[in-house]
Image (cartoon, helix red, strand yellow):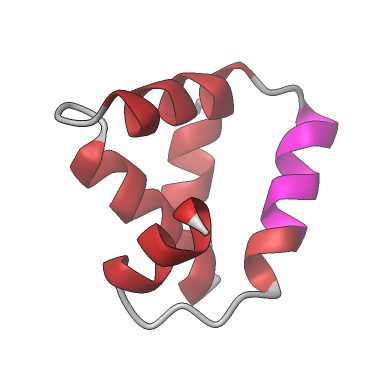
Amino acid sequence: MNNFEKLLNSKNKNVIIFANTIQAFKNSQVFYSRLFRSICEQDTEELNNLIKILKKQNFSDTLDVVMWLEA
């Protein structure tokens, strides 16, 4: 299982919304394509740090993720 699949299979709502957002835009937006690739290349420690950060967020939908990333 690659890093991105780990995010998609998470039990945490924020992590799943984040992963779904990246997946939705990765083929049409360069920023999201690079972010997807970067996540896939992270080592275990980096991925765990990302997950910790995401779990602290309060995402309701894709727009929340976009606003958080682009703020």
Which residue occupies 78% across, 34% down? 46
Q: Is residue 56 left or right of residue 1?
A: right
Which residue occupies 47% across, 30% down? 35
Classify 2 as above or below 48.
above
Spot occupied by residue 4 in the image (x, y as percentages of width and height): 47, 35
What are the residue bounds of the magenta stretch? Answer: 44-52
Residue 17 appears anywhere in the view: no
Q: Quadrant of residue 5?
A: top left
Magenta residues: mostly which secondary structure?
Answer: helix
Q: Is residue 54 left or right of residue 19?
A: right
The stretch drawn in magenta includes residue 19: no
Which residue occupies 39% across, 73% down? 64
The stretch drawn in magenta includes residue 49: yes
Depth check, front residue: 18 or 30: 30
Which residue occupies 14% across, 30% down? 28
Spot occupied by residue 25 in the image (x, y as percentages of width and height): 22, 40
Classify 3 as above or below 10.
above
